[in-house]
Image (cartoon, rainbow, N blue to C red):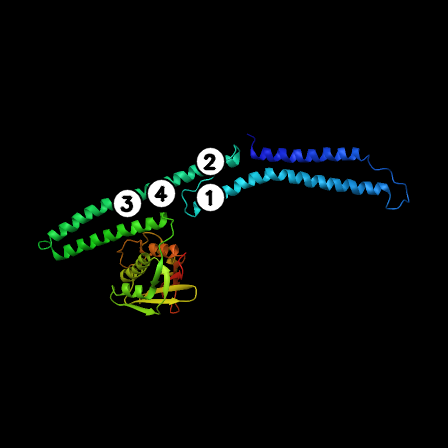
Amino acid sequence: MLRLYTRFYIALVASLALFLVSTAILWRLMGGPTVMPAGHMLGHPSRAWAVHFHLLLTVLALSIGVAAYPLVRQISRRLERLQRGVESLGAGDLSARVPVEGKDEVARLAGSFNRSAAQIEQLVKANKTLLANASHELRTPLARIRLAVELLKDSADARRRAGLEQDIAELDWLVDEILLASRLDTVTEAIDTQEVDLLALAAEECSRYDGAQLEGTPGVIRADPRLLRRLLRNLLENAARHGVAPTQVRIARDSAAATITVWDAGPGVPPTEFESVFRPFNRPSSGAQQSGTGLGLSLVRQIARRHGGDARCATMPDGRSCFLVTLPLRAG
């Protein structure tokens, strides 16, 4: 099969050759122009011959252009299908494939894309299987450790027992967050949304934390209540671990979106770390308490974006920082 650039080159040369040959044939068939005597008017037959000749040349050029269109369109159509396949894969459709047509460069590119997409799909499936198996294997020893702690409840030192219980709770929380982060990354189906009163949900979560203060007006949005509850809980947990009480939560909304603002009495996040705090397993650079999984804020942003919104750090008028989450009234 000829290479793609060779086909274009041959088509161009053939079009030029056809044009020249056709021009020569027209010239001979029309007999060529006669010499125009000096002083003759513009309506001389030679002038009419020139007009007809140029008109025929124009029609000929248009005909060659129309005849070459199917070849160019065939190649561009395959490139468009390849583009749609790449966009589908980039949007999260791991089953996206494109048809392999012909034996030129475009066909080889389509074959390479299909092989790469298949490998990516296989890797993602293997990753999901690994995480599911790991969660099961981790929870089994965690359950045994928890049982052992209960059996040692009366004989073990109270301080050591409390430490063990805290370690177990953090490991259990870590497993949950890793699984949720993986699911948000790999599952491309639309989230299951329903009408949720954001202020009421925030009130439930704030009641779990001492000193958490809530303000705002009731408002209903369409969201996944389970994911939204995790978003609020992670923000409050982050403030409890790394901030200074009391924690403030404000719920506001306009005609397009609802806004969740969370801050505490401490200085907050330095402006240089506004983005890094949302990276998985990030730890604060300050001397604050280093407990936690390091996934909480990363999950906050993932959940917000799965709803069509976003999460970021912002500077308040008094110079402190806050966490700002925007959620459209109808989840994307």
- First of labels 1, 3 by sequence position: 1
Three-letter code, disc 4: Val
The image quarter containing residue 234 is bottom left
Three-letter code, disc 3: Ala
**Residue of label 3:** 132
- First of labels 4, 3 by sequence position: 4
**Residue of label 2:** 111
Q: Position of residue 171 (x, y in %)?
A: 23, 51
Q: Residues within 10 Å of mark 2 (few under 14, many from 20)?
A: some
Q: Residues within 10 Å of mark 4 (few under 14, many from 20)?
A: some
Specify the farthest residue to the left: 155
SS at mark 1? Answer: helix
SS at mark 2? Answer: helix
Rounded to the nearest angstrom, the CA distance separating label 3 from label 2 is 32 Å
Residue at 35 percent across and 59 percent down: it is 194
Q: Position of residue 300 (x, y in %)?
A: 34, 57
Left or right relative to 172: residue 270: right
**Residue of label 1:** 86
Whether residues under marks 4 and 3 lie with C-beta atoms below 8 angstroms apart, the answer is: no
Whether residues under marks 4 and 2 lie with C-beta atoms below 8 angstroms apart, the answer is: no
State whether residue 267 appears in this view: no
Judge by depth and name the residue closer to the eye, 206 or 280. 206
Rounded to the nearest angstrom, the CA distance separating label 4 from label 2 is 20 Å
> Above or below — where is 127 with respect to 168?
above
- First of labels 4, 2 by sequence position: 2
**Residue of label 4:** 124
SS at mark 4? Answer: helix
Rounded to the nearest angstrom, the CA distance separating label 4 from label 3 is 12 Å
Q: Position of residue 73 (x, y in %)?
A: 58, 40
Rounded to the nearest angstrom, the CA distance separating label 1 from label 2 is 12 Å
